[in-house]
């Protein structure tokens, strides 16, 4: 069973689908006396073995039209939230909220199975709050003002399900000759909508004191592949860190622990390939 299927099953088990013929979870926030609805997410596989989650939330406003939040989240193969996108529609306001973009891209990685899910969800929800703060007049009761915090709680729950369902990230594996410090799967060309990026983010959880050796696997043209490594910067341009070819030896000081990197500008591959960093 794929990770997406596992996460989908776990999300279905985590909520009580008590509304809309079992397709939604309706609940009340008693602290602000407001009602909300979470729709069953659509969870699909990503090419890298992770999961893409698409769902919607409603702020139920009785006789008035509901407010809506459409959320998409991309999790890597270890259940870590890599990017999130939210579009908020506040009824009665002209185009006040739209897509917030990948607000989590470049969020510093946090310890797996610990605070990662919570921190990522909070970042996403606070971005929503920033949009709502643009409203010069908010005459609704607490239900609308409380919408971001409710989204935050749901985000935390979904992200916790994902990170608890997925396998643990790899730790450096000792062998008789070397240690695997990082590995990442890349597409043979930039991802859709990207100029350079061809992989999801990856990180080093540890680094050797000397050199890293690069190998390409899972591709018949491995000896002809070249690419670069770029660092994911949340506010600013992503710098190129190093050029890679099969057998390249790199000074490990070029990288930092728990910093997001990705593969870019691949050449020579006719299908997906894996980049391995050993030391």
Image (cartoon, grey):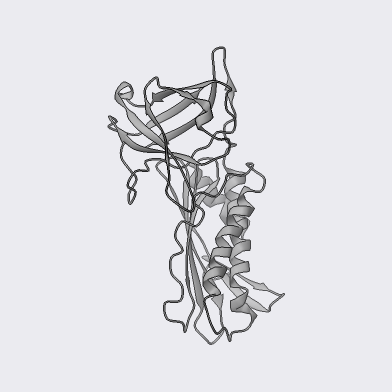
Instruction: Choose top left, top right, bottom left or bottom right for residue 209.
Output: top right
Instruction: Choose top left, top right, bottom left or bottom right for residue 94.
Output: bottom left
Residue 16 visible, this angle: no
Name the residue at 57% across, 27% down: 207
Q: Nearer the viewer, residue 139 or 248?
A: 248
- Location of residue 29 in the rendering, given as x and y in whole percent from the top left corner: 67, 73
- Location of residue 238 in the rendering, given as x and y in whole percent from the top left corner: 43, 45
Q: Nearer the viewer, residue 224 or 91?
A: 224
Asked if 236 appears above or below 139 in the picture, the reply is above
Q: Nearer the viewer, residue 11 or 17?
A: 11
Name the residue at 43% across, 65% down: 99
- Location of residue 98 in the rendering, given as x and y in whole percent from the top left corner: 43, 69
Q: Nearer the viewer, residue 44 or 237?
A: 237
Is 256 on the left or on the right of 43, as rendered? right
Residue 159 visible, this angle: yes
Name the residue at 32% across, 35% down: 266
- Location of residue 83 in the rendering, given as x and y in whole percent from the top left corner: 49, 52
Is 146 on the left or on the right of 194, as rendered? right
Asked if 113 appears above or below 152 in the picture, the reply is above
């Amino acid at each position: 069973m794929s990770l997406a299927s596992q996460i989908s099953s776990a999300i279905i088990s985590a909520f009580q689908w008590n509304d809309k013929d079992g397709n939604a979870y309706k609940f009340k926030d008693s602290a602000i006396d407001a009602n909300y609805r979470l729709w069953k997410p659509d969870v699909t596989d990503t090419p890298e073995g992770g999961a893409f989650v698409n769902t919607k939330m409603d702020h139920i406003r009785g006789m008035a039209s509901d407010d809506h939040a459409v959320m998409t989240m991309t999790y890597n193969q270890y259940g870590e939230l890599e990017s999130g996108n939210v579009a908020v529609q506040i009824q009665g306001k002209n185009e006040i909220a739209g897509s917030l973009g990948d607000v989590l891209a470049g969020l510093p990685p946090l310890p797996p199975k610990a605070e990662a899910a919570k921190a990522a969800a909070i970042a996403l929800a606070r971005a929503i709050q920033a949009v709502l703060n643009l409203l010069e007049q908010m005459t609704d009761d607490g239900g609308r003002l409380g919408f971001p915090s409710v989204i935050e709680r749901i985000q935390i729950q979904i992200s916790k399900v994902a990170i608890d369902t997925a396998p643990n990230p790899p730790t450096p594996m000792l062998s008789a000759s070397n240690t695997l410090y990082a590995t990442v799967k890349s597409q043979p060309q930039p991802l859709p909508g990207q100029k350079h990026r061809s992989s999801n983010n990856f990180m080093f959880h540890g680094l050797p004191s000397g050199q890293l050796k690069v190998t390409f696997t899972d591709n018949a043209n491995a000896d002809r592949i070249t690419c670069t490594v770029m660092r994911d910067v949340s506010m600013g341009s992503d710098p190129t860190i190093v050029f890679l070819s099969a057998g390249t030896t790199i000074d490990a000081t070029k990288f930092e622990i728990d910093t997001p990197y990705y593969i870019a500008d691949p050449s020579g591959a006719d299908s997906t390939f894996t980049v391995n960093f050993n030391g």
